[in-house]
Image (cartoon, rainbow, N blue to C red):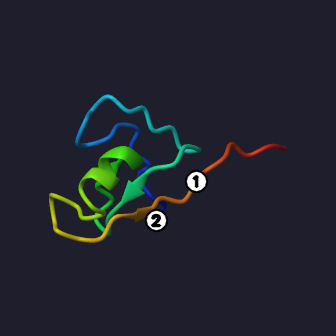
Amino acid sequence: MPLEMRERCERCERAALPPDSPARICSYECTFCVPCSEAMQGTCPNCGGELVARPRRTARTG
């Protein structure tokens, strides 16, 4: 099952996070921009889990 790849930061709501941009997620796929993740010291405010780099997804060619 692929990641949901949410396109908005759940904290600031302003950051656009397209699939090929850097973002941070927890194991429940809560999604945050890098500045918000750093401000929260890498801890998800929803579940208390660790925020890690979300894999980037690029458009397929061919």
Q: Is residue 61 shown left or right of residue 38?
A: right
- Position of residue 45 measured from the top left corner of the image (x, y, whole percent): 16, 58
- At horizontal 17% and vertical 68% (from top left) the residue drawn is 48
- Position of residue 27 measured from the top left corner of the image (x, y, whole percent): 32, 69
In the displayed structure, 37 sits above or below 59; it is below
Residue 8 in which image quadrant? top left
In the displayed structure, 42 sits above or below 31; it is below
55 or 22, which is in the foreground?
Answer: 22
User: Which residue lies most toward the top here?
Assistant: 14
Answer few, some or many: residues within 10 Å of disc 1's Cα (few below 14, many 20 plus, some between 14 and 19): few
- At horizontal 41% and vertical 48% (from top left) the residue drawn is 34
Answer few, some or many: residues within 10 Å of disc 2's Cα (few below 14, many 20 plus, some between 14 and 19): few
Residue 13 in which image quadrant? top left
Residue 33 in sight? no
Q: Which residue is mark 1?
A: 56
Residue 39 in sight? yes
Q: How many marks?
A: 2
The amino acid pointed to by label 2 is Met
Q: Which residue is mark 2?
A: 1
Q: Is residue 24 shown left or right of residue 20?
A: left
Secondary structure category for the residue under label 1: loop
Disc on the earlier residue, 1 or 2:
2
Foreground tag (1 vs 2): 1
Q: CA distance from mark 1 to mark 2?
A: 16 Å
- Position of residue 42 measured from the top left corner of the image (x, y, whole percent): 30, 63
The disc placed on residue 16 is: none
The amino acid pointed to by label 1 is Arg
Secondary structure category for the residue under label 2: loop
- At horizontal 32% and vertical 41% (from top left) the residue drawn is 9
- At horizontal 33% and vertical 59% (from top left) the residue drawn is 29
